[in-house]
Amino acid sequence: MTETPRSTRAERRLSRARTVRRRRIALVATVFVVVLALVAGSAWWRLQGNISRIDVSGDLATDRPTAAAGPLNILLIGSDTRVEQDATDAEDLVGARSDTTLVVHLSADRSEVTVVSIPRDSMVRMPPNCDASVPKDEWPVQQFNAAFSLGGPACLINTVEADTGLYLNHFAVVDFTGFKGMVDALGGVPVCTPVAIDDEKAHLKLAAGTHVLNGTQALGYVRVRYTEGDGSDLGRIERQQAFLSSVVQEATRTSLLLRPDKLYGFLDAATKALTTDKQLSVGTMKDIATSVKDVGVENVAFVTVPVRTYPEDPNRVEWTEAADTLWQALLDDESVTKKTTSTPTASAKALTVSPADVPEVVIVNGTGVDGLAGQDAEMLRVQGFPQVLTGTTDERRDGVLVEYPPGQKEAARTVAAAFPGARLKRSSDTGSSIRVTVGPGSKAVVEVPNRLGSDPVPSPSITAPAAQSSIEARTADEDICS
């Protein structure tokens, strides 16, 4: 057998990666593209009335997380039932199924977008009978997708906010049945399945390979679960995202935008499939879409909440410790993709502040291993850092986080250069000090390029434990038919 040259395989992987990056915008791009097309289209003012809006504020918890200034979190829900066009109450969505739930995080500077898929089979804390007035420590553990069915968007918002700590600024419900009209208006949508599909429940039968699906077939495709893959919700999440992104690709083709008849038919179907909160106006959606229009696909990260089998039911899953790390990263407005790499980026350019001029450094041990902070502190002192204190925390966060007060970024870069893979973050909580929190997976201190003195850095005798379960965040992976 002739071996494929490495260069050819690499080019093929790169091609597949580019394809997937374009494909995985999913519901986020669906909403944004619709809004931008509405603004660009001459008939947008007639179509915007198709979008239903409901007020859920009266059903939300009174102790919601604090809204962060800058970042934006949007809850996107793929549902099987769309409210009537004249809907005025959230109860119109009760009973609908939430087949897909995404939390979309837009960074404060709008340079990155993180899309987190929450498996519907997750067992999480949920308000009993969707009554958010019940104290959270009394909430029972229930299956995640029950929240939307039992209490509509408000119950789902309360559940997500309580279990993640994130404040959700807006929500949008996209009805899958509405995609039938969108797909037909586009003249079909191409999909690729690596295996044959014969699903009686989804009323779909396809041979392995690429197909152009009409609206009815497309609806069956996004519902397939039991006769493709391992039957889990995780596989269906990938397939639904790929399908929805294919819709976006077809919708944004120049030929559609240049055909007023096709454009109106698509937008009419798309807007009829959309339900949002009262505050998510067309103007607000346009502003959001405009703010992220320059985000490259390499800065759009797709993550599925890390899960493992739920001990009490092998057909359900529970979130792992890595899920806590994921949600904390979004709370801190940190890059999920950069959190998973060990490549040191904090000192990529020349350091401008000498260790002697660095203000007080506080090393906080978040590993649970006694003596690690003291060891790191001595390794800094021998390099000329004059003031190094230590502390501990019960919080476990992988890697090293260097937090610095306003005006001290360059000094913080000098400190971070001693910690491979350290992440930098501006903070107003450190006083005048630079705080270094070392967690599981952190590496031993190294010499900084502009160190002082000639005494060797002591060899470490204490090491941090291995990193916790990793977050599988990526901007590209192999194509579904590879």
Image (cartoon, grey):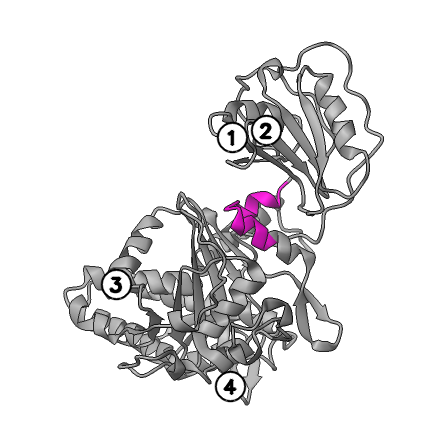
Which residue bears the numbered disc 4? Answer: 202
**Which numbered mark, 1 or 3, is in the foreground of this view?**
1
Residue 208, position in %: x, y?
55, 75
Residue 172, position in %: x, y?
38, 68
Q: Name the image quarter holding the N terminus.
A: bottom right
Residue in view at x 66 percent, y 20 percent: 387
Q: Residues within 10 Å of mark 1 (few under 14, many from 20)?
A: some
Which residue bears the numbered disc 1? Answer: 405
- The answer for how far apart the CA atoms under marks 4 and 3 are is 34 Å
Residue in view at x 26 percent, y 71 percent: 267
Residue in view at x 52 percent, y 63 percent: 161
Which residue bears the numbered disc 2? Answer: 434
Q: Is residue 339 magenta?
A: yes
Q: Is residue 245 magenta?
A: no
Secondary structure of the residue carrying numbered label 1: loop
Q: Up-down: is 188 above or below 425?
A: below
**Amino acid of disc 4:** Ala
State which region is magenta.
Answer: 326-341
**Amino acid of disc 2:** Ile
- The answer for how far apart the CA atoms under marks 2 and 4 are is 57 Å
- The answer for how far apart the CA atoms under marks 2 and 1 are is 7 Å
Residue in view at x 63 percent, y 77 percent: 231
- The answer for how far apart the CA atoms under marks 2 and 3 are is 43 Å
Which residue bears the numbered disc 3? Answer: 282
- The answer for how far apart the CA atoms under marks 1 and 3 are is 38 Å
- Nearer the N terminus, badge 4 or badge 1? 4
